[in-house]
Each structure stands twice: as structure tokens, then as C-alpha cells.
Image (tube, helix red, strand yellow):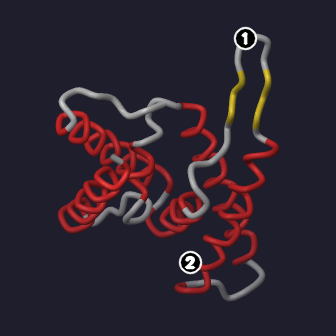
Amino acid sequence: MIELAVTIGLVFSLISYEIFGLAAGGIVVPGYISLQLSQPDRLLGTIIVSLVTFVLIKLISSYTFLYGRRQMVLSLLIGCLLANASRYFLSIDLTSSTIQLQAVGWVIPGLIAHWFAKQGIFRTICVLLITSVLVRLIVIILFNGELFPA
């Protein structure tokens, strides 16, 4: 099911970029995000880590020449470090449940942050959510209504 979601996500990423000129936060991102749509705390954690990565990239770019491949690699590196840190520091234990604001994957927040810088935060989040929901819908249809495992 994971492979199918990522493959369909690749197709929707390509379609959204070719038709609308908007990337869904990276070509593999919609597939992975669609797997987490039932866990809003992880989605929120991914967006938080991506935003912090984006802000750090903006701060660093005000002191250095940061564009193109350098910006992409630094976004991935910072996103990876912050995603790993989120696994340890963004877990909130409540009396009834635990809120885990950990990011999805290691590369996903860096890819999203890179596209935040290229096309804007609002556009990236909108296209990402639309494509992720479409991916999840198609996978549910293909598996005869069976939902993703939680």
C-alpha cells in the first residue's frame, strides 16, 4: 500500500506541476503525507518542522549566498536534523493521550521547506493537501474501502 501511495503521489505531483505550475512540496511528498492523514498531530509536526527549516534557511541566506542546489541541500539537511529532533522533543504526554508532533520521514520537511521558499507557504500547503487527499482517495478506492493502517 505504501508503494502504491507513493507512486500515485508521483503522478499527482507531476500533474499539479505540469497543469498549475505548483509543486506539492516535492515529488514524493503527497504519497507520504497521504499515509498520515489520519494523524493530524503528525501533519502539524511536519508543517512546524518545515516552517522552522524555512525560517532558518531565510536567516542563513541573509548572511551567505544561498540559492539553487546549495539551498536545496541545506534545506534537506536542516529538515532532517529537525525531523529527528522532533521525534524526541515534540511528544506531549497528556492524561488521556499522547500528542506526537513528530515530522513525517526525514527528507519530507526539507523538501516542503524548499518549496516554501520557491513558491510560498500558502500555495505549497494548499497543493500538498489537495494532492495528498486525492492520493488517499484513490488508494482507498483501489483497496475496496479499506483504510490505511493507523
Q: Secondary structure at mark 2?
A: helix
Query: Residue 96 — which label?
Result: 1
The crowding category of the residue bearing disc 2, from other C-alpha atoms within 10 Å (few below 14, some 14 to 19, many at least 20), is: some
Q: Nearer the viewer, mark 2 or mark 1?
A: 1
Q: Position of residue 35 (x, y in %)?
A: 42, 42
Query: Residue 72 — which label?
Result: 2
For the point 25% across and 66% down, the residue is 14
For the point 43% across and 33% down, the residue is 149
For the point 44% across and 47% down, the residue is 33
In the rendered structure, the answer to whether residue 139 lies left or right of residue 25 reads left
Q: Position of residue 137 (x, y in %)?
A: 25, 36
Q: Nearer the viewer, residue 12 or 4?
A: 4
- Comes first in the chain, label 2 or label 1: 2
Question: Could you tell me how many numbered marks the image carries?
Answer: 2
Q: Secondary structure at mark 1?
A: loop
Q: Amino acid at mark 1?
A: Ser
The crowding category of the residue bearing disc 1, from other C-alpha atoms within 10 Å (few below 14, some 14 to 19, many at least 20), is: few
Query: Residue 117 — which label?
Result: none
Q: Position of residue 69 (x, y in %)?
A: 54, 86
